[in-house]
Image (cartoon, rainbow, N blue to C red):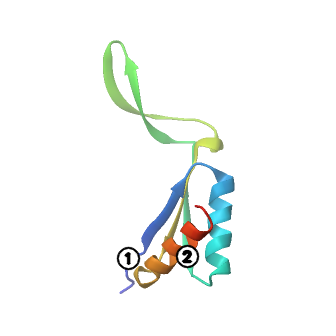
Amino acid sequence: MKKKWVQVFASCDQQKFFSAKNALSAAGIAFETDGMGGSLRLSMNHVGGAAGLSLSRGGGENALLSISVRPEDEAAARAALAKAGR
């Protein structure tokens, strides 16, 4: 059974995302990436005086990008990201 990976980074900023990936690669830490596209996302809105949740469409600039590592690499990954300023 595959162990659950631990998320160590999440951002909508692509530059920070790629900097974080580079920092983990330079430290020799294996990682997985994931991106929830901005084309379909859950949003809060206020329609007709009532607040509610709805799905909305938008551009890729709002995509949530995340990086996960193996549980045994979490401490080293967080240290590498801190050293890189991420």
Tell me the kind of residue under disc 1: Lys
User: Where is mark 1, residue-wise?
Assistant: 4
Q: Position of residue 1 (x, y in %)?
A: 35, 87
Find the distance from the CA under tag 2 to the CA under tag 1: 12 Å
Residue 1 vs 69, above or below: the answer is: below
Query: In which quadrant will I find the C terminus?
Result: bottom right
Tell me the kind of residue under disc 2: Phe
Question: Image check: 1 left or right of 12?
Answer: left
- Could you tell me which residue is drawn at 64 percent across and 56 percent down? 16
User: Where is mark 2, residue-wise?
Assistant: 31
Q: Position of residue 73 (x, y in %)?
A: 47, 82
- Element on which disc 1 rests: loop
- Element on which disc 2 rests: strand
Residue 1 vs 4, above or below: the answer is: below
Question: Image check: 15 left or right of 30?
Answer: right
- Which quarter of the picture shows residue 46? top left
